[in-house]
Image (cartoon, rainbow, N blue to C red):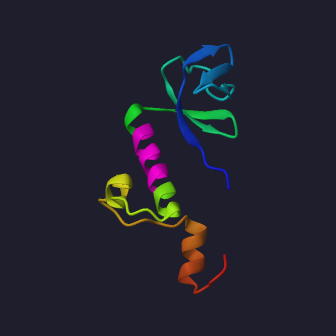
């Protein structure tokens, strides 16, 4: 499984950025600058993030990692974006669930 992760750009030169020692392709985010947060998937920045959104994503990824390790963690704090709402499925999966399908 591949998951996009927030990364703060340390340096930018043309369409290549450097974040946490890794090269980041900035072709899809040409206006990114050093210090910006970007959402990186398979080595390429997909979009810019503000610091708050980057923090929420990083906290959720830490919560997922803690749950996978079987550690007792304050998951409510790590998944703060779910505090005011119930998780939802993408429309095609919700339709399958509503139809009673067990495998989508």
Q: Is residue 12 left or right of residue 76?
A: right
Q: Is residue 56 magenta?
A: yes
> Which secondary structure class fits the magenta region best?
helix
State the residue at coordinates (63%, 21%): 17
Front-lying residue, 77 or 29: 77
Q: Is residue 78 left or right of residue 67?
A: left
Q: Where is 91 relative to 25, above or below?
A: below
State the residue at coordinates (57%, 75%): 95
Q: Residue furthest left?
A: 84
Q: Residue furthest bottom?
A: 100
Q: Quadrant of the C terminus?
A: bottom right
Front-lying residue, 29 or 51: 51
Q: Where is 56 relative to 44, above or below?
A: below
- Give the quadrant of residue 30: top right
Q: Give the x, y percent position of residue 51.
A: 40, 32
Q: Quadrant of the N terminus?
A: bottom right
State the residue at coordinates (51%, 67%): 89
State the residue at coordinates (38%, 55%): 79
Residue segment shown in magenta: 53-63
Q: Give the x, y percent position of residue 67.
A: 47, 62
Front-lying residue, 14 or 77: 77
Q: Give the x, y percent position of residue 29.
A: 61, 26
- Give the quadrant of residue 75: bottom left
Q: Give the x, y percent position of residue 9.
A: 55, 23
Q: How many marks?
A: 0
Q: Where is 32 relative to 7, above or below?
A: above
Q: Is residue 35 magenta?
A: no
């Amino acid at each position: 499984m591949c998951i996009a992760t927030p990364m703060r750009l340390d340096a930018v030169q043309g369409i290549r950025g450097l974040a946490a020692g890794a090269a980041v392709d900035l072709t899809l985010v040409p206006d990114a600058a050093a210090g910006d947060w970007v959402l990186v998937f398979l080595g390429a920045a997909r979009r810019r993030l503000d610091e708050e959104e980057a923090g929420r994503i990083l906290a959720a990824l830490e919560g997922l990692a803690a749950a996978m390790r079987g550690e007792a963690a304050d998951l409510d704090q790590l998944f703060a974006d779910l505090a005011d709402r119930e998780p939802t499925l993408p429309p095609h999966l919700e339709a399958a669930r509503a139809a009673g399908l067990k495998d989508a």
